Structures are given as C-alpha cells and as structure tokens.
Image (cartoon, rainbow, N blue to C red):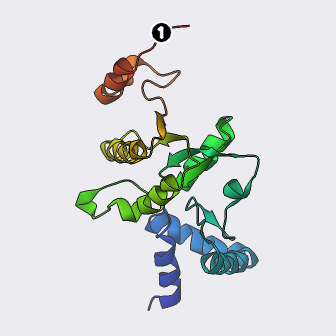
C-alpha cells in the first residue's frame, strides 16, 4: 500500500511552475534521503513567508513591510512609474537598466475571457495614485502579447485622463537574432516602430 504522506508531498510539489510528477518525486525523495534539515528549513521559511509577505500598499510588489524597498527608497524618482506584469520583471529591469523611478505591479494582464478585469490588476489603486498627482511619466513594460498590449492601451487611456505622459518599452527584433526566425507579429512591430540610425 502506497504511503499517503509521501504521495501528498509529491503532489504538493507539483504546484511549482515547471515541476511535473517525475520532478516532484525526485525532489521529495532527495529531501527525504539526503537533506532533511534543508527540507525543514524550507518548510519553516515557506510558512513564515506565507504568513508575513504581503503586497506593498503603493505598488503591489511583495514585501514584509507596508512599503517595499523600492517605494521606501527616497533616492528613487516618485514622479516616474514603470508598470510591469510580474515581480520578476522588476528585478530584471533593475538589474539590466539605469531606471531610477518606482514601479507598479499588475500581477497579470487584462483577460475578459478568464474573468480578469481592471480591479483584479489593481488598476483602481493605480487610478487613485494618478488622481492624487505627483506622477509625470509612466513607462509601460507589459508583455508583447495581445493581452499585454490591451492592458497597456487601457493604462495609457487612464493616464491620459490625468495628463501623465506615457512611454512604452521598445518592441521588435531582439539583438543578435536572425530576421528569418522572427514571427510576423514581431517583424510588424519592428517595422512600425523603426527609427533613424543616429
């Protein structure tokens, strides 16, 4: 008779992205066989994180405090806001660019078919921030999908009502890639947004 607790452990590990039943089984057996102390630490940290980490009241990023460290940093420009879909986007932008403004996290994109509307993305919170003033510029860093572009358009319309200028990150053919490998949507955007060579 199979061990119910082991089966449950394996099943619970499959909630992680990219982890199927085989990978979950490998992880569970590794932790049980070789590293029980690390497994206990992982479990305790997961429980603490789930009980403590919340959304920043200004930007919706994950934090243990009322404000995340990006919103609390007085050196960052409060007049600039970069809007992203995922927390990992913030880390990527911060690591790869010299952007010194603040962020706003959507945790997804508009998708009426999936029942995801503006309130689900915190766009009511964003509108409140825009209505109080102090934000001069928004950079839209949503994904280059149909849903991401629809979300960007919705936010651009919202920002326009409050006189906030809108920028969107560049789209098109990535550096180092071959044109023949680019899909038609990427090529279409690249040609529509072409610029002078300076």
Q: Quadrant of residue 54?
A: bottom right
Q: How many marks?
A: 1
Depth check: give the residue in front, 197 or 46: 197
Relative image position of residue 194 (x, y in whole percent): 41, 16
Position of residue 17 relative to residue 170, above or below, is below
Residue wearing tag 1:
196
Residue 87 appears left or right of 68: left
What's the residue at 51%, 8% (across, down)? 197
Residue 57 appears left or right of 155: right
Depth check: give the residue in front, 179 or 186: 186
Quadrant holding the N terminus: bottom left
Of all residues shown, which one is farthest toward the left? 113
Secondary structure of residue under mark 1: loop
What's the residue at 46%, 77% (across, down)? 11
Quadrant holding the C terminus: top right
Position of residue 90 relative to residue 176, above or below, is below
Depth check: give the residue in front, 146 or 40: 146
Of all residues shown, which one is farthest toward the bottom? 1
Relative image position of residue 27 (x, y in whole percent): 58, 69
Depth check: give the residue in front, 82 or 22: 82
Relative image position of residue 9 (x, y in whole percent): 53, 80
Does residue 12 appear in the picture of this structure? yes
Relative image position of residue 160 (x, y in whole percent): 40, 42
Q: Quadrant of residue 171?
A: top left
What's the residue at 55%, 47% (across, down)? 89
Does residue 3 appear in the picture of this structure? no
Position of residue 198 relative to residue 190, above or below, is above
Residue 127 appears left or right of 45: left
Position of residue 186 relative to residue 79, above or below, is above
Counting other residues with Cα less than 10 Å from the Cα at mark 1, is it few (<14), some (14-19), or many (20 or more)? few
What's the residue at 53%, 21% (across, down)? 176
């Amino acid at each position: 008779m199979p061990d119910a607790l082991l089966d449950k452990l394996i099943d619970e590990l499959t909630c992680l992205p990219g982890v199927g039943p085989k990978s979950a089984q490998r992880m569970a057996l590794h932790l049980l066989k070789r590293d029980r102390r690390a497994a206990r630490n992982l479990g305790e940290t997961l429980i603490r994180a789930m009980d403590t980490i919340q959304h920043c009241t200004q930007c919706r990023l994950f934090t243990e405090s009322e404000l995340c460290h990006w919103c609390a940093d007085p050196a960052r420009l409060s007049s600039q806001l970069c809007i992203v879909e995922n927390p990992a986007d913030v880390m990527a932008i911060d690591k790869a660019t010299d952007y010194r403004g603040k962020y706003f996290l959507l945790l997804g994109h508009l998708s009426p078919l999936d029942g995801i509307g503006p309130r689900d993305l915190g766009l009511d919170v964003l509108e409140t921030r825009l209505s109080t003033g102090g934000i001069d510029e928004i950079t839209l860093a949503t994904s280059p999908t149909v849903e991401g572009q629809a979300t960007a358009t919705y936010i651009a319309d919202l920002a326009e009502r409050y006189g906030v200028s809108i920028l969107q990150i560049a789209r098109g053919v990535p550096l180092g890639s071959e044109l023949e490998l680019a899909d038609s949507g990427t090529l279409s955007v690249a040609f529509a947004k072409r610029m002078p060579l300076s």
